[in-house]
Image: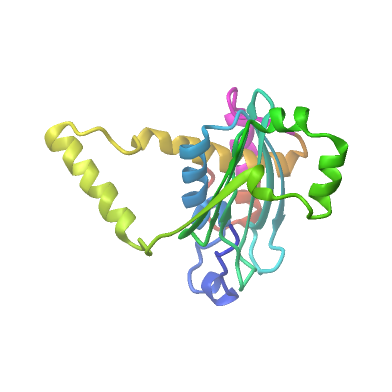
Amino acid sequence: MTSWWRPQGYYDQSEWRATWGGEGGGVLVNQAPHQLDLWQWLAGTPKKVFAKLAFGFQRDIATEDEVNALVDFGEGVTGHFMTSTNDIIGTDRLEPLFDEGKVVVDKSNKVTVYRLSEDERDLSDKMTMEDVAKLFRGEMDASSLYTVEERTYESAWGQQDIDVLTNFAAHVNDGTPLIADGAEGINGVRLASGMRLSAWTGREIDLVDYPAEEYLSELNKRIEEEGKFPTRS
């Protein structure tokens, strides 16, 4: 998700923006939490994360403006998350891969669903090398392997907030189940913090047995270096 372009003037307009003491981070705190929350809501909470972050890479700020992270969901399932604030063209793309196909979501409104005719492992076991050669040369009818369905949705810009607030009111008044419990917000915060701690220390971070005190210590070091805001406790 790199459709979060922000010019230097955006950061210069307020002293607290993209600071360790005022905001607590950069793109992972201000812009990308929307995608981190959605990602975990769809795929589950990662168990570990290893990340490379760029701090003040393309903007005159102290915090992260570019992120590349690998996560481990357990049982061999992995994922990749990328975001930045310096891509003026921007890419908004979600691509989950499954045993029986793949879903590609572009710009949050175009969805392409690929459905395999069989489980991918079964296709692999049955396919001869002659079949593979035909596939690579474009001589095989792809429809024998998978179908493709495309859907386009109208923009729901702003409607998400209305839906969540309406759902919350219905929960308070009538006990309607919540779309997402507010307590789940800690998952996205912990994942973002884990990405920073991984970048600071150069190691994979356990998100289940999360080293919160270590993160707080590393964060406070950077707040003290800024010299603008009080440290966190």
Say left or right for 189 vs 158.
Answer: right
Percent x, y of residue 213:
59, 30
Left or right, residue 142 beside residue 25:
right
Q: Position of residue 202 (x, y in %)?
A: 78, 39
Residue that extends furthest to the left in the rendered view of this protein: 173
Q: Is residue 20 visible?
A: no
Specify start and end residues of the magenta stretch as a single range.
204-220
Q: Residue at x 51, y 41 (%)?
A: 189
Identify the residue at horizontal 81%, vertical 41% (top origin): 131
Q: Is residue 207 magenta?
A: yes
Relative to 15, residue 219 above or below: above
Q: Residue at x 61, y 73 (%)?
A: 88
- Residue at (60, 35) in percent of width and height: 100
Magenta stretch containing residue 195, yes or no? no
Q: Nearer the viewer, residue 154 or 88?
A: 154
Q: Quadrant of the N terminus?
A: bottom right
Query: Which of the 4 image quadrants contains residue 51?
Result: top right
Residue 188: x and y in percent read 50, 40
Q: Quadrant of residue 215?
A: top right
Q: Nearer the viewer, residue 112 or 214?
A: 112
Q: Is residue 71 visible?
A: yes
Seen in the picture, residue 213 relative to 202 is either above or below; the reply is above
Q: Left or right of 121: which side holds 177?
A: left
User: Which residue appears farthest toward the bottom when viewing the image?
Assistant: 9
